[in-house]
């Protein structure tokens, strides 16, 4: 015996998505937010489109500048660094998960302003170190692990912790 949910699902069988309808839907989606080619193709696969139709839709979107993986990578990197406080390593992994090519990843990471990156790292170190003693080895290790989990490079983390220790010593001496 079928449950009510199974009957409803069978009744709501989707009509196959045409190439023109897919072009319109995906163009509207890409106009609202920056999207990469992998995300678009996954959406179309879930809609059970044929691979040749997916390729045609992607070609249309790319030619009309709705989809640009380089532009997506730069926007992704900028937003994750600025709003989520991610480091370069975590941004790189996020872009790789979106199947962005290595050249686009390098361009996106190079487009991050060094001053903004350093200031976001220092802000993250200061906020996380609020209840910690940076002179204590265990607290420094905890802070280091936390910043590494946010995707910052070990050399940058060490430099930031050293700067934090210097700042705290200066305020104590004053």
Image (spheres, rainbow, N blue to C red):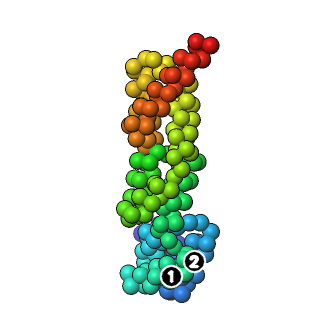
Q: Residue at x 61, y 72 (%)?
A: 31
Q: Which residue is mark 1?
A: 63
Q: Secondary structure at mark 2?
A: helix
Identify the disc placed on residue 48. Answer: none
The answer, for residue 161, to whether it is visible in the render is yes
For the C terminus, the image quarter is top right
Q: Residue at x 45, y 17 (%)?
A: 135
Count neighbours of disc 2 (C-alpha within 10 A) and say few if under 14, some if 14 to 19, many if 20 or more. many
How many marks overall?
Answer: 2
For the N terminus, the image quarter is bottom left
Q: Where is 92 relative to 103, above or below?
A: above
* Left or right position of 160 against 130: left
Count neighbours of disc 1 (C-alpha within 10 A) and say few if under 14, some if 14 to 19, many if 20 or more. few
- State which quadrant residue 64 falls in: bottom right
Contact flag, marks 1 and 2 (Cβ < 8 Å): no
How far across and down, in percent of the image, does residue 130 sit?
Answer: 56, 25
Front-most of 84 and 125?
125
Q: Residue at x 57, y 35 (%)?
A: 123
How far across and down, in percent of the image, does residue 166 sit?
Answer: 51, 22
The answer, for residue 4, to whether it is visible in the render is no
How far across and down, in percent of the image, does residue 5 sit?
Answer: 50, 67
Q: Where is 18 relative to 82, above or below?
A: below
Q: Residue at x 39, y 63 (%)?
A: 103
Q: Return the residue found at the far top.
A: 173
Label 1 or label 2, whichever lies nearer to me, is 1
Front-most of 29 and 18?
29
- State which quadrant residue 27 falls in: bottom right
Q: Where is 141 relative to 13, above or below?
A: above
Q: Which residue is mark 2?
A: 27
Q: Earlier in the sequence, mark 1 or mark 2?
A: 2
């Amino acid at each position: 015996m079928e449950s009510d949910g199974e009957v409803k699902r069978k009744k709501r069988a989707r009509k196959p998505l045409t190439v023109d309808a897919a072009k319109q839907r995906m163009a509207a989606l890409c106009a609202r937010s920056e999207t990469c080619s992998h995300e678009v193709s996954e959406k179309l696969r879930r809609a059970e489109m044929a691979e040749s139709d997916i390729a045609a839709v992607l070609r249309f979107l790319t030619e009309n500048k709705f989809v640009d993986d380089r532009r997506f990578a730069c926007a992704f990197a900028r937003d994750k660094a600025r709003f989520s406080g991610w480091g370069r390593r975590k941004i790189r992994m996020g872009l790789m998960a979106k199947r962005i090519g290595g050249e686009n990843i390098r361009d996106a990471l190079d487009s991050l302003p060094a001053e903004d990156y350093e200031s976001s790292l220092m802000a993250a170190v200061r906020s996380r170190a609020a209840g910690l003693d940076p002179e204590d080895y265990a607290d420094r290790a905890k802070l280091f692990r936390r910043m590494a989990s946010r995707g910052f490079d070990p050399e940058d983390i060490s430099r930031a912790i050293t700067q934090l220790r210097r700042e705290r010593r200066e305020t104590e001496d004053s």
